[in-house]
Amino acid sequence: MHLLLRLLILTLASPLLPHAAPEADAKDRPNVLFIVCDDLNDYIETLGGHPQARTPNIRRLIESGVSFTQAHCNIPICNPSRASFLTGLYPHTSGCYGFDHWDGYEVLKNSRTLMAHFRHHGYYALGTGKVMHNRGRDQWSEFGYLSDYGPFANDGEKTDVAHPDIPGPFRDDFGAVDGSFGPLRNLEGTRFTWRTGNWAGKRQLKYQSETDRDPTGDELNAAWAVKKLGELAVSGKPFLMGLGFIRPHTPLIVPRKYFDLFPLESIKLPEIRFGDIEDTFKQTLAPGSDDRSDDRGHKMYSSLIKSFKGDRELALRKFIQAYLASVASVDDLVGEVLKVVESSSLKDNTIIVFTSDHGWGMGEKDYLYKNSLWQESTRVPLVIRAPGVSKAGGACPLPVSLVDLYPTLLDLCGLSVDTRLNPKGRPLDGHSLKPLLIDPQEGAWDGPEAALTALYKWADYYDPAGQSYSQRYRDWRYVRYANGKEELYHAAKDPHEWHNLAGKPEQAGRLQRYRKDLLGIIPSRPLSEEQKATRWKIQYFKKNPSADTNKDGKLSWPELNAHRGKKDPAGGQKKAE
């Protein structure tokens, strides 16, 4: 029996609980199915990222909708990207550039998420898997499974370890998540077992054979979505469904049958120019002038190659094989979900969106990771099929970004574009893509000339003016780092972004215009003296937890003053508050 069918039989039925909306105006409006993958770059059919990509179901969706071939994320790392496109606000608007909970930001907690806004307008909003990066279950009418990054290998001694087939130092340098890839297989006779689950709790995962095993997290989410879509097709309840697949996020562990689709010796490597890194950020960075999370992508690349005894081609083939296998596994699940929509009453009144939170570099510029401002990290698949609106098989070459999704769905569903909960919220930053769905080549779009991407860099406060950014124009990419260093690529003629033209005198005018464009967008919000003092207090508490004399988990100014002899952050006397 097909695994997904068995999952459907085992899935417990749960009633669709109505949500009392202040504006129950969803009747006769289209439904929305929003599918988001994790770390999926352009390695899908039709986008040209890799010639061996096997994604027939995603291709079928592309052929029935519009593909935005220059769609880019607004920040190439999980949490802030999802916080951005699910609120319709740029990182520089919200201040969310990192991994703090999205609802801890003043602007975001006072603005409605996509799902909360649809609920507000009478839709039944249900989701499962990794849609938001963290928290947010209360934003939905109903929620299925939490994010499950497994399977993980467990050796019985440590919590989780890399796949047993992974050599060191990569295995030890990057561990059970980023340092792990390989087929899901029978581990009998070894000290290893499989586990799966989310960070809050994990469970054993049985694997005897492909026909005798437990489902993966992505398979559970697909089965949940299939079941719920079947119920919704019968009930006629207007809905927005968010379906989040983990793969191809690391660990790149999926059933062996997907690895078998891509024999190792046949794997084609991306075009990588020797020395491509030399005219980029890594070489132009002045020591100590910036911190890009310690250049994790360069470390991953170097460690991977070292682990295969310096054989760069073998190392990359191994990793790319696992990535392609992971993408193929997701494509199969997308196909199961699409099958329900297309064989039911949902077909003609359900908008389908397929995308990813950001991309992933595969060794280009000696970089193996997300979170760069180059095309491998910023470019994402974006497909929208809107019955009666989108042009089947259309391809739009204009640069757009994920922040445009929220206003697009509001436009297609005829909902209010005011998503603020109160004046502390902010209006949507994006622009509706509906004109480009109607006419992908010549549609009159009022969006910006370039797609804007910010870079994640750990900090406990983010002044937008102190971050790094990229602007992807139709034919050019401009990059400006926090230290003022720049890159300029003629992407139309140099699609691999091999030649940084920022230092060429003949490009001085263009560089000046792009610099002015970017700096005109990004605001400066330096810390106030009060904020500086509060930050200082937080850091002091981290270093001196014993200063919390009443043990309430917070450090007051009187407690701090008592602990350090009544001195305030500036060195004078601080009054008790």
Image: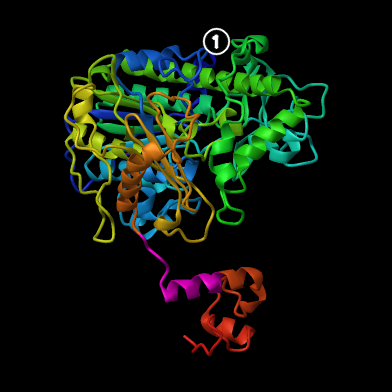
Q: Is residue 123 above or below residue 435?
A: below
Q: Residue at x 65, y 36 (%)?
A: 300
Residue lying at the far front in this picture: please name it.
505
Q: Position of residue 345 (x, y in %)?
A: 26, 17
The range drawn in magenta is 524-538
Nearer to me, 143 or 190: 190
At which x and y percent is residue 525?
37, 63
x, y percentage for residue 117?
27, 44
Label 1 is placed on what type of residue?
A: Met
Q: Is residue 144 visible?
A: no
Q: Quadrant of residue 180?
A: top right
Report how many numbered discs are placed on residues in the image.
Answer: 1
Colour pattern of the rendering = rainbow
- Measured along the vertical axis of the image, is residue 288 above or below residue 367? below
* Residue position for label 1: 1
Q: Secondary structure at mark 1?
A: loop
Q: Is residue 451 visible?
A: yes
Q: Which secondary structure is most common in the magenta stretch?
A: helix
Residue 58 occupies quadrant: top left
Q: Residue at x 27, y 24 (%)?
A: 350
Looking at the picture, tell me which residue is in the foreground, 24 or 349. Answer: 349
Residue 73, image quadrant: top left
The residue carrying pointer 1 sits among few (fewer than 14), some (14 to 19) or many (20 or more) residues within 10 Å by Cα, namely few
Question: Is 274 covered by the magenta stretch?
Answer: no
154 sits to left or right of 64: right
Choose between 535 and 19: the one closer to the eye: 535
Position of the N terminus by quadrant: top right
Residue 526's place in the image compared with 494, above or below, is below
Task: From the viewer's perspective, tell me whether residue 51 is left or right of residue 232.
Answer: right
Residue pictured at 16% horizontal, 30% vertical: 444
Q: Is residue 534 magenta?
A: yes
